[in-house]
Image (tube, rainbow, N blue to C red):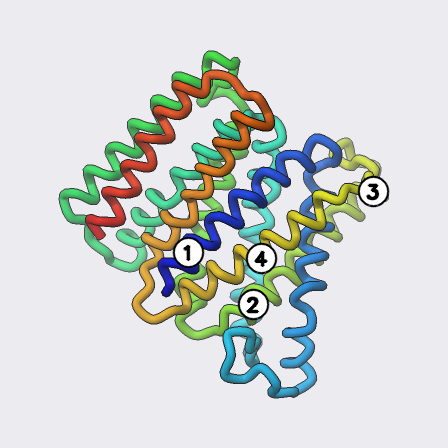
């Protein structure tokens, strides 16, 4: 069952990325993230309120929030800071890069999640898993060569740098998720994490507004943000539910979730009319092959 929830999360995540790309053409990154997480918090607030109020209506279900200690809240707050950094840098990169390029870079994240699992949790790779990592690195090298044709330098481009920060912080967040799901309810982590991210984003936006920072731009209402909030809430719920399931593997869940790049790639071709799709498609295909090898080898 955890495999199917991971697949469902990937589909919703792909749609989320497409609408996020569209919204970034009309608003700045910070406002998009602020209002999207705020709406997500509103969607999850009934579940949090039932826990805070002491009601036990949802006990025994996947929607139960449960009680958390101060230590639990501090861990979720730490995750919120990491996620906020990942989302800000990721959306900045997505806003200024072709969605096919940004999406393929994000697809490399499961490889680094597996490497993190080796270093932190003591997991060991078998020969086929090493083959998968080498194939993935080759795909990223190929993507770098292709992107240079569009004036995107993988070494000197600041938006590529932002994407890599998003990937690294995303890997840290995923490894932390594995730890959190061992002792917390999925809805507890998702609900309170959204709340803390909303507070963090509100502080950043208000600071930019009152100090008139260059990054601050007035917000223009955009219906796409409502869709972004809905799809990321549903996607994250399935993701946490998958990790919380008995027998689930973080490396496999992370790889399946990153298959959302298929949706972003197709939309990049059909909606955004991006270029060099044949070369990018080859890099994406090789990267997906590496994921398939990694899944079966695991």
CA separation in Å, label 1 and label 4: 21 Å
Give me the residue at 75% from left, 44% from top.
223
Nearer to me, 269 or 147: 269
Q: Secondary structure at mark 4?
A: helix
Q: Residue furthest right?
A: 210
Q: Which residue is mark 4?
A: 80
CA separation in Å, label 3 and label 2: 28 Å
Give me the residue at 38% from left, 30% from top.
284
* In contact (CB < 8 Å): disc 3 and disc 1: no
**Label number found at residue 209:** 3
Give the image quarter of residue 233.
bottom right
Instruction: Point out residue 28 in the picture as x, y percentages from the top left corner.
Output: 72, 36
- Looking at marks 3 and 2 on the same chain, the residue that comes earlier in the sequence is marked by 2
- Looking at marks 3 and 1 on the same chain, the residue that comes earlier in the sequence is marked by 1
- Looking at marks 2 and 4 on the same chain, the residue that comes earlier in the sequence is marked by 2
CA separation in Å, label 2 and label 1: 27 Å
Q: Residue furthest front?
A: 270
Give me the residue at 27% from left, 43% from top.
292
Residue 142 to residue 167: above or below? above
Q: Is residue 196 left or right of residue 286?
A: right
For discs 3 and 1, the disc positioned in front in the rendered view: 1
Give me the residue at 71% from left, 57% from top.
39
Q: Which residue is mark 1?
A: 6
Instruction: Point out residue 44 in the picture as x, y percentages from the top left corner.
Output: 65, 66
Q: Which residue is mark 2?
A: 74
């Amino acid at each position: 069952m955890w495999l199917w929830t991971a697949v469902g999360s990937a589909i919703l995540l792909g749609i989320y990325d497409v609408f996020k790309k569209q919204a970034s053409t009309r608003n700045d990154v910070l406002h998009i993230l602020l209002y999207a997480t705020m709406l997500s918090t509103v969607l999850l607030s009934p579940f949090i309120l039932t826990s805070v109020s002491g009601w036990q209506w949802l006990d025994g279900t996947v929607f139960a929030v449960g009680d958390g200690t101060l230590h639990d809240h501090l861990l979720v707050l730490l995750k919120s800071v990491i996620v906020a950094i990942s989302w800000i840098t990721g959306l900045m990169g997505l806003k200024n890069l072709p969605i096919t390029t940004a999406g393929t870079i994000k697809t490399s994240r499961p490889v680094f999640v597996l490497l993190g699992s080796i270093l932190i949790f003591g997991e060991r790779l078998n020969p086929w898993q090493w083959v998968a990592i080498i194939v993935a690195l080759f795909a990223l090298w190929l993507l770098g060569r292709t992107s240079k044709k569009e004036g995107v330098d993988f070494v000197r481009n600041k938006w590529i740098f932002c994407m890599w920060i998003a990937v690294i912080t995303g890997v840290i967040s995923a490894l932390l998720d594995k730890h959190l799901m061992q002792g917390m309810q999925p809805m507890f982590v998702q609900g309170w994490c959204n709340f803390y991210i909303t507070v963090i984003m509100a502080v950043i936006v208000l600071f930019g507004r009152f100090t008139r920072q260059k990054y601050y731009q007035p917000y223009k209402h955009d219906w796409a943000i409502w869709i972004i909030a809905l799809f990321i809430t549903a996607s994250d719920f399935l993701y946490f539910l998958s990790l919380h399931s008995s027998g689930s593997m973080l490396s496999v869940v992370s790889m399946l979730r990153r298959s959302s790049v298929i949706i972003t790639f197709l939309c990049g071709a059909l909606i955004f009319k991006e270029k060099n799709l044949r070369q990018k498609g080859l890099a994406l295909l090789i990267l997906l092959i590496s994921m398939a090898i990694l899944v079966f080898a695991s």
